Image: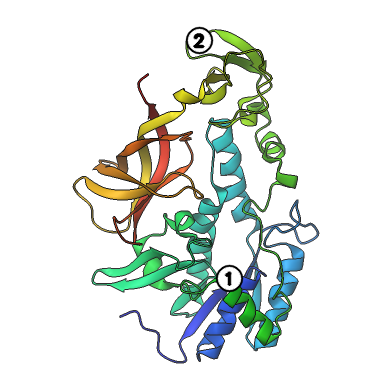
């Protein structure tokens, strides 16, 4: 069903980095009719705001050079307006609503695995391949998404929104490889980017200052307001909730308290930052919206869930609810669960991704 025959056309999404370059090279060596495509996400006369970002002018040059080296056609598609609307503007909107967004998920979901995937089909490709570290396993009911063999590089958390139809079409040649082996392949082939540093997660953020993007796209979001404690008493002032995230300690401008204070909640309607002690950061229950199910689930089920990309998964009960929503009950409280982040479900005792959704509001642990 999903095995590609020799000579099948495959579109390789080439960002200019070593991972996607080796992906294209491996496909070429396996006898596929490979077409390389690079997305231009920024104006042609500018570069992203910081070194190491993907899809910049230099990256387009690297992708084109690699394509020439391995002998495949290469095209550059102008996706600047799509990227700005689907990723940058939504990133700013999310921060303005007091959330902590993950733009890389939006980029995969709404640009790479949507518009680019449609383009691949228009080119007559039978599959599209990317350099993500994640595994695609053929199952009885279609392709399954699994964590990568290299747990340090695993990117399955960022791909939870991949639909079943997209997963059936996609290929991830690096899923069983480790980074050192990928670089070794690139060096052996003499690829120009064999030793190129890894790209940064948020490619469009200037020097890591996300507030600059938010203030430019949503200038009305920087509304000053009060910093209040859990009882609502004013303990300070702030210059805008976009400067804070749940769990943050530094930058509050508060001192002289009996114990350190952390951001517990952001209230965009009243422009308030709610603070409290670390003990109040823990949450054991959360609600999710826009859940993507990678496997039929009609009843509550046990799973391991991740609420941040770099955190280890923890045991939980996931309860599917109407309108693509869900409730997650953690076996033990997790600190700083932030609205706008993703909660991704993994099977108990295995590597399969069962789905995931966007966190709307955690329920604090009772004192």
**Does the image show residue 78?**
yes
Q: Residue at x 65, y 30 (%)?
A: 243
| Circle number at residue 179 | 1
Q: Could you classify mark 1 by the number of other residues whose Cα lies within 10 Å: few (under 14), some (14-19), or many (20 or more)?
A: some
Residue furthest out toward the front: 258
Of 57 and 243, nearer the camera is 243
Query: Is label 2 or label 1 in front?
Result: 1
Residue 232 marker: 2
Q: Say which residue appears at 50% left-offset and 89% top-offset.
A: 30
Q: Is residue 37 visible?
A: no
Answer with the quarter of the image where residue 148 lies. bottom left
For residue 92, which quarter of the picture?
A: top right
Q: Residues within 10 Å of mark 2 (few under 14, many from 20)?
A: few
Q: Is 135 located above or below residue 237 in the figure?
A: below
The colour scheme used here is rainbow
Where does residue 185 sit, x and y in percent of width and height? Answer: 61, 82
Residue found at the very far top of the displayed protein = 233
| Quarter-of-image position of residue 228 | top right
Q: Could you tell me which quadrant the N terminus lies in? A: bottom left
The answer to whether residue 227 is above or below residue 3 is above
Q: Position of residue 157 (x, y in %)?
A: 45, 54
Query: Which quarter of the rendered picture does the C terminus lie within?
Result: top left
- Residue depicted at x 47% and y 79%: 125
Q: Nearer the viewer, residue 198 or 38?
A: 198
Q: Position of residue 236 (x, y in %)?
A: 64, 13
Helix, strand or loop at label 1? It is helix
Q: Is residue 322 above or below residue 219?
A: below
């Amino acid at each position: 069903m999903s095995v590609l025959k020799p000579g099948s056309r495959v579109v390789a999404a080439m960002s200019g980095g070593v991972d996607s370059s080796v992906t294209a090279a491996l496909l070429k060596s396996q006898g596929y009719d490979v077409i390389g495509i690079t997305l231009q996400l920024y104006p042609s006369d500018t570069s992203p705001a910081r070194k190491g970002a993907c899809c910049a002018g230099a990256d387009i040059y690297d992708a084109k050079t690699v394509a020439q080296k391995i002998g495949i056609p290469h095209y550059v598609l102008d996706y600047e307006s799509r990227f700005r609307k689907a990723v940058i503007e939504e990133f700013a909107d999310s921060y303005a609503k007091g959330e902590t967004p993950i733009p890389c998920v939006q980029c995969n979901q709404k640009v790479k695995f949507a518009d680019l995937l449609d383009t691949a089909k228009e080119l007559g490709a039978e599959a599209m391949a990317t350099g993500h570290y994640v595994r695609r396993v053929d199952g009885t009911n279609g392709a399954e998404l699994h964590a990568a063999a290299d747990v340090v590089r695993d990117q399955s958390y960022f791909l939870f929104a991949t639909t079943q139809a997209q997963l059936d079409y996609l290929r991830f040649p690096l899923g069983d490889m480790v980074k050192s082996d990928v670089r070794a392949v690139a060096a052996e082939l003499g690829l120009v980017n064999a030793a190129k540093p890894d790209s940064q997660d948020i490619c469009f953020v200037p020097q890591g200052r996300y507030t600059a993007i938010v203030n430019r796209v949503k200038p009305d979001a920087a509304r000053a307001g009060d910093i209040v404690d859990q009882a609502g008493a004013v303990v300070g002032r702030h210059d805008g909730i976009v400067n804070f995230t749940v769990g943050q300690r530094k930058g509050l401008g508060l001192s002289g308290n009996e114990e350190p204070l952390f951001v517990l909640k952001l209230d965009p309607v009243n422009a308030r930052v709610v603070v409290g002690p670390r003990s109040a950061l823990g949450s054991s229950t959360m609600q999710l919206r826009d859940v993507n199910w990678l496997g039929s689930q009609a009843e509550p089920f046990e799973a391991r869930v991740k609420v941040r990309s770099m955190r280890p998964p923890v045991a939980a009960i996931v309860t599917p609810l109407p309108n693509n929503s869900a409730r997650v009950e953690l076996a033990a409280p997790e600190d700083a669960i932030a609205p706008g982040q993703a909660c991704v479900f993994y099977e108990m005792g295995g590597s399969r991704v069962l789905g995931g959704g966007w966190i709307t509001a955690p329920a604090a642990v009772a004192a």
